[in-house]
Image (tube, helix red, strand yellow):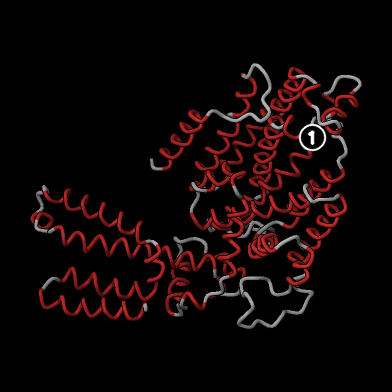
Amino acid sequence: MSHGISLCLVLAAILSQSTSNYIFSFSFAITGALWYLSGPYLVRRWMAISSSLLISSLVGYLACYSSKSFFLSTLTFQNWLAFSFLLVVACNAVDHLDAILNTYPHLVTLDKSKQAKLQNAFTATYWIAMFKLVSNMPSETDLHSGPIDDLNTAIRALGPASRSWKTMAALFPSNLRQDLCLLYAFFRTADDLVDDAPTPKECEDNLVTIRQFLRDVFYNAESQEQMEINKETDPSLPSHINWDHYASLLPNKDVLAIFRNFARISHYLCPRAMFELTEAWELDLRGRPIKKQDDLLRYAALISGTFGELCTCVIMYKTGRGNWGGRDKLARKEDVLSRARATGQCLQLINIARDIIADSFVGRCYVPLQYMPNPPQAIYHLLKVARNPMQVGEGTLKSFALRILSLADQISEKAQKGIEGLPDEVQDSIRAAFEIYMAIGPTLRNDPGFPVRAKFNLLPGHFILLRFIRSSFN
């Protein structure tokens, strides 16, 4: 089908030469070549292409209609339509090729170190890779559907509970947004496996499975024989992992798909940070009280500080700054990662302060015993065991929240500096998300009571977003 349409467009280009309309001839010829590469993708995006085409044609024609330039004033609307169509289709075709290169980098090279050099579109290496991809362009039916199907599963699994995350991710470039969502989906899924399994025994077993999976992903790649790849094997997956084994251990196919997504991006993630995350999940599983303020800081650093470090690994890799997962010692900068951990730690403290009541309703308590008046065991029992936070009193609960918020304020300056160490193209997006989340603090402080789950006001939040979106265009 694509071949037939491409031939028709080339034939139209040849026939239009007889009318001396060289703009239409050129447009038809180039569009035929682009359709050969990205025809199905262009069809799927017909609404976006049509609207972009109409707007750009009208703007170009009206701008040049009153132009003093003789050449520009002679261009007809049909000329602008042909030119705009060529430009819009070419941009969409490049987007399509870039998406294939990001999702199926093995089509160009199987070497992970070489794949790291394909992430920056402003390098010659990237465009050489694009040329190789075009010269050996497979049809969409020949591409394994596994990466796409698993990506759709991850996005669906995030669900309405992750609205703030998806809003923030929407401000990132598409290739970065995709991998951050895969990482976050794994983080959320693994956390739920440890916290929300039907029985304590299943929670324990799930944590064992997660740790075994991480060992297989990060450390057992060279110790196991590579499985033979055939047409049914997904070449984007590490072939040394026994996926049938994990299918028997994990609760359903969706969870298995999210684990597969993680395996695809694991080669540029930091193993130490991932195993520190499992330590945080084990602390949740044990359910022991947090005794001192320093214990709370350590927990926040483990659960969200390490996640901030992992997100930094993704950001640096996908923006062409190299592999920060530990394999490229020259690219990795520990001071930037330390500040990224502070950013995650700060946001986690705000999350804990906001959710004291909500956590109590599900049998969790992250308030240090150090904060509780004597005897602290009585208040801890009301929050953790009896799940009756209202009996503690709003004033007491709010005092806990304010002390935790003051902890977040103490590290917020370092957290802000962590954002400054990130690439320019993502700083505004992350700073907007950070400021929106930080706005929860004033909401809690100014509320006369203590809400079950405080949220920032929508209007100030929208102003913050608009301010940073505007600055990104300046």
Q: Is 229 displayed left or right of 163 in the figure? A: right
Residue 365 horizontal/vertical position (percent): 80, 34
Q: Residue at x 82, y 55 (%)?
A: 207
Q: Does residue 388 lie above or below 11 as drawn? A: above
Q: Residue at x 76, y 79 (%)?
A: 225
Which quadrant, please, contains the C terminus? top left
Residue 96 horizontal/vertical position (percent): 43, 66
Q: Residue at x 76, y 52 (%)?
A: 193
Residue 259 horizontal/vertical position (percent): 69, 61
Q: Secondary structure at mark 1?
A: helix
Q: Is 354 displayed left or right of 44 in the figure? A: right
Q: Which residue is mark 1?
A: 296
Q: Does residue 145 lie above or below 418 as drawn? A: below
Residue 253 horizontal/vertical position (percent): 69, 64
Which quadrant, please, contains the N terminus? bottom left
Q: Is residue 93 visible?
A: yes
Nearest to the observer: residue 293 or residue 59: 59
Q: Does residue 393 lie above or below 220 as drawn? A: above
Q: Residue at x 78, y 47 (%)?
A: 195
